[in-house]
Image: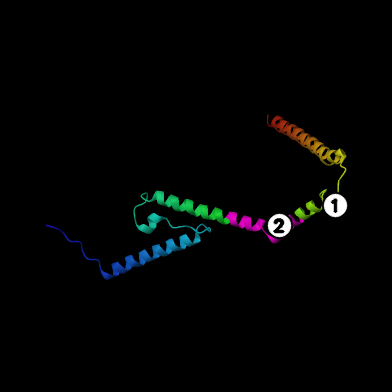
Amino acid sequence: GTEQEPHASASDTESEASQRRARLDCLGSSLRSLGNGQKLCTLSALSGIKAGTLDRTEFRLKRWNEFVLNMEILGSGIAFCVSLQSIMMALATVVATFMCSRAVLNISFKTSIDVVTYGTVLPLTLGLESAWNNCNSASTALAKLKAAAI
């Protein structure tokens, strides 16, 4: 009464082995790339399990790839900020501040509010006036366009 499964031929076994090897190679290259813009293989495609059963694991793999990519971006940003030029500028700033302190050279400055007034308030006022005039001309042009459409 029991039926036996037919034995797989040698070519079928070799074909399955080559498919498994290809899947593992794809997984290895995907894990090595970790989000370098290459398309990652899904785990369900690699394992041969029907789609949907490994969605949680695929989601975790995707999140891990995003995390690694973000860490690479953060690392390159930190490497950009911590360059020889930025370190030298920070050191020059600290030395200049120390040299200009009252304890070392006793340098003091007499400041006037005129610098703030002419350097900040006047350009800001002129910029706001220009923006207001542009808004009014745009409103007039829109009103003319609506009138012409009617």
Image quadrant where one finds the C terminus: top right
Q: Is residue 61 left or right of residue 87?
A: left
Local packing at callout 1 (Cα closer than 10 Å; few below 14, some 14-19, many 20+) is few
**Could you tell me residue 12's position as x and y percent?**
29, 67
Q: Which mark is residue 147?
A: none
In the image, 27 versus 148, the foreground residue is 27
**Could you tell me residue 86's position as x and y percent?**
71, 57
Task: Read off the residue under disc 1.
Answer: 105
Mark 2–mark 1 distance (CA, rounded to whole Å): 26 Å
Q: Secondary structure at mark 2?
A: helix
Q: Is residue 107 left or right of residue 30?
A: right
In the image, 118 versus 134, the foreground residue is 118
**Could you tell me residue 6's position as x and y percent?**
21, 64
Task: Read off the residue under disc 2.
Answer: 86
> What amino acid is at disc 1?
Leu
In the image, 7 versus 117, the foreground residue is 117
**Residue under the image location 81 percent in, 53 percent down:** 99
The magenta stretch is 73-92
Which quadrant would residue 2 be assigned to in this image? bottom left
Which residue in the rendered view is the most extreme toward the left? 1
Which residue in the rendered view is the most extreme toward the bottom? 10
